Amino acid sequence: MRKIRELMRLKYELGRSHREIAASLGVANSTVSDYAGRARAAGLSWPLPEGLDDAALEAALFPPLPPSRVPRPEPDWDQVHRDLQRHKGVTLRLLWLEYRTVHPDGYGYSRFCDRYRLWRGRLDVVLRQVYRAGEKAFVDYAGPKFAVVDGRTGEARDAVVFVGVLAASNYTYVDVTRSRSLPDWTASHVRMFEFFGGVPELVIPDNEKAGVRAASRYEPDLNPSYQELATHYGTTVLPARPRKPRDKAKVETAVQHVERWVMAPLRNQTFFSLGELRGAIAPLVAALNERPFQKTGGSRRGWFEDLDRPALKPLPARRYEYAQWRRARVNIDYHVQAGGRFYSVPHALARREVDVRIAAATVEIFHRHRRVAVHLRARRKGAYTTDRAHMPAAHRAHAEWSPSRLIAWGRGVGPDTAAFVKRLLESRPHPEQGYRSCLGLMRLARAYPAERMEAACRRALDIGALGYGSVKSILASGLDRAGDDEAHSPSLPAEHAHIRGPDYYAAARNGTSPNRKES
């Protein structure tokens, strides 16, 4: 008001132009013209009448608008709000056009929008956002916990409370699990989708460590198992921004309602299993979803049936099966360690990094997003599971042999060769340790005729040389062709000056030397 009084003084007492007054007061020329016109309409000049305070001056310059003679028809704002949520293509302009079709003398578009925003502003803060039907589900854990008592030991263990809420209808789901681990986290999502009877387009969790490995404002890193669950159900996980509670205001309010209407009534009861606890929670959750809204018509269940249920994606034919994902490097023996067990992959992937998916019954191995191996999950710790197709050709040939088959091969060469192979395998702590020697004998059998192999094996058995190297040496030196007497009794000269016979050693024991001369 001070500037308005100065404006009137400059104009009516000093006769300044509008441009000069605007420059002096720091306002626009149009503002000076507007105020001067209002003063003329009110019959005011300078000096102002005595006793005219600021309130009276404002009332004279800005009189209230005369009331409309014909009241405008008021739209059904609750229905407008629902229509905006139900369909993606519905806009305020489309709803206004429909409104004007029924009420041609109704509000203009700008007034229609202003009055809708005014109506929406009276709602709770979590209802002010326009959520599309079937678009978003918010999930989080409640702070308080239940206690589940072990009937045998009397020990009480905590049970955490999982809360999920559909954004458009506020339809609420509650689950209890032993922990906030990844298996429990994903299992609660599976049961939530089944409770809803469908899948929303987006799932918005807080940055729960089980599901989000690295929280980030721009690129959160999801756990691979959580990402696999989202892929299986055809939805998208979009974690809330760190330290931004307004991003998940829906579930924050839902958690408060669960604590008030579900957890508080059960505070004095004792539960001895999760199943018993879930049975007590179910009717309270149903009552919460049936409770009427205070500021809008209907209930959570009514809005769910009207808005969310028709818009949810159908559940897949097969329920999600939890699986762990691990990053591993293939060992030099083309096996990967997973859960204390070892599983083969194609030998060409030795020393490469692979992704291992460990399910309840199977183990799958992926290289660059392509599955390269699948095995039944081994139960014994330290067990090796090997697919023969993954072996190199040489290893595969080695693995195809057995002791009986090796002995049968030796019998095909001759009885002495079969006997040698049998003795060779029996001489090792494990028969597999003699396989390589037997493979060497096969190679010799391709280079020498059967009669020489038989003679070499017979000679090796006689001297107890049970090895591939002995047979090879006998064949290479031609000893297999020598007679038995020559082989077992080598000829030496009967007498020689440098040969010490038994008489020499007898004399040495008696203290005399046969070579000692008498003095």
Image (tube, grey):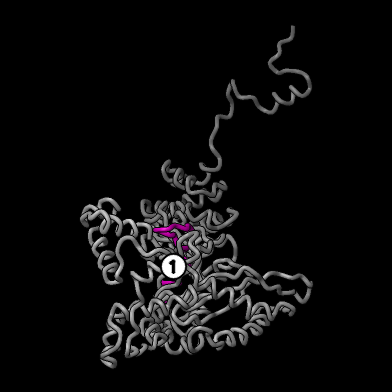
The one of 399 and 314 positioned closer to us in this rendering: 314
For the question of whether residue 170 can be seen, the reply is yes
* Label 1 CA crowd tier, 10 Å (few <14, some 14–19, many 20+): some
Amino acid type at mark 1:
Gln
Q: Where is residue 129 in the image (x, y as percent from the top left)?
A: 42, 74
Circle 1 residue: 227
Horizontal and vertical percent position of residue 83 = 36, 85
Residue 466 appears left or right of 65: right
54, above or below 90, in the image: above
Q: Regarding mark 1 in the picture, which secondary structure is present there?
A: helix
**Residue 422 image position (x, y, % from top left):** 54, 59
Frontmost residue, 376 versus 122: 122
Relative height, residue 90 to residue 391 (above, below): below
Residue located 32% across and 90% down the image: 70
Residue lying furthest bottom? 102
Q: Quadrant of residue 91?
A: bottom left
Please provide the residue range marked out in magenta: 213-233
Magenta segment includes 76: no
Q: Quadrant of the C terminus?
A: top right
Q: Is residue 30 shown left or right of residue 128?
A: left
Please report the residue visible at 59 percent of the width from the left and 87 percent of the height from the top. 287
Residue 60 position (above or below residue 281): above
